[in-house]
Image: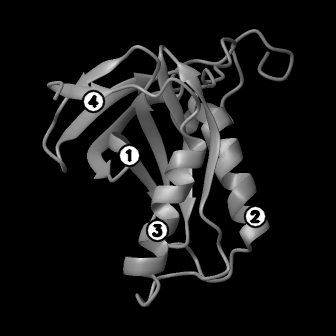
Amino acid sequence: MLPGINGFTHNPSASLEEAFQAVAQTQMRQLPFYRAHIPVRACGFQLFEQQWLGCMLTPWMLSLMVLPGPGQIWLTRAVGEKLALALPCGNVRFTVGEMDDCGQYLAASLMSPLEKQISADTMILLAEQTARMALSLPVVDSTRPENPGRRALFRMPVGSPEGA
């Protein structure tokens, strides 16, 4: 047995959906926060720095997930251990999880439990867009100061026509 977690050669979405569907059917269905109208769906998984990154939607949660990619071997970690990763969107704090047939993964909970009134289509769209946003660089307006303060909103710059 190898001392680590072997990476997924191909997109892990189907394996994740199968594993989480089994948990949904056997362990989660009877819980009060289970939303039967929400499907189990792995959304937007793609390679980022040789790791698979995407969102996992289930009837009880929405999480950003990272799994080892092709040729990767992750060190085995304690389930529940916290790990911060720098993504294009910013720093994200992940928790180590483990699932039969999927091995260990990193998950950052984004919504748990899910709101009762949100539709399945809306949640799938949110999961897909969140996966894309995690890999998007933040937009910064370079013409504005970093932290102008509230009062700066009411001042005109010196030399402007209104302030002259």
In the figure, 60 relative to 124: above or below?
below
Mark closest to the chain's N terminus, 1 or 4: 4
Q: Which residue is mark 3?
A: 22
Taking the spot 46% from the left edge, 58% from the top edge, the residue there is 19
Q: Nearer the viewer, residue 55 or 9?
A: 9
Instruction: Tell me the quarter of the picture where residue 158 sits.
Output: top right
Q: Nearer the viewer, residue 28 or 126?
A: 28
- Discs 1, 4 touching: Cβ within 8 Å: no
Q: Amino acid at mark 1?
A: Ala
Q: Amino acid at mark 2?
A: Thr
| Horizontal side, residue 5 vs residue 40: left or right | left
Q: Amino acid at mark 4?
A: Ile
The numbered disc on residue 122 is: 2
Mark 4 and mark 3: Cα distance apart in space? 21 Å
Mark 2 and mark 3: Cα distance apart in space? 23 Å
Q: Amino acid at mark 3?
A: Ala
| Residue 117 horizontal/vertical position (percent) | 68, 82
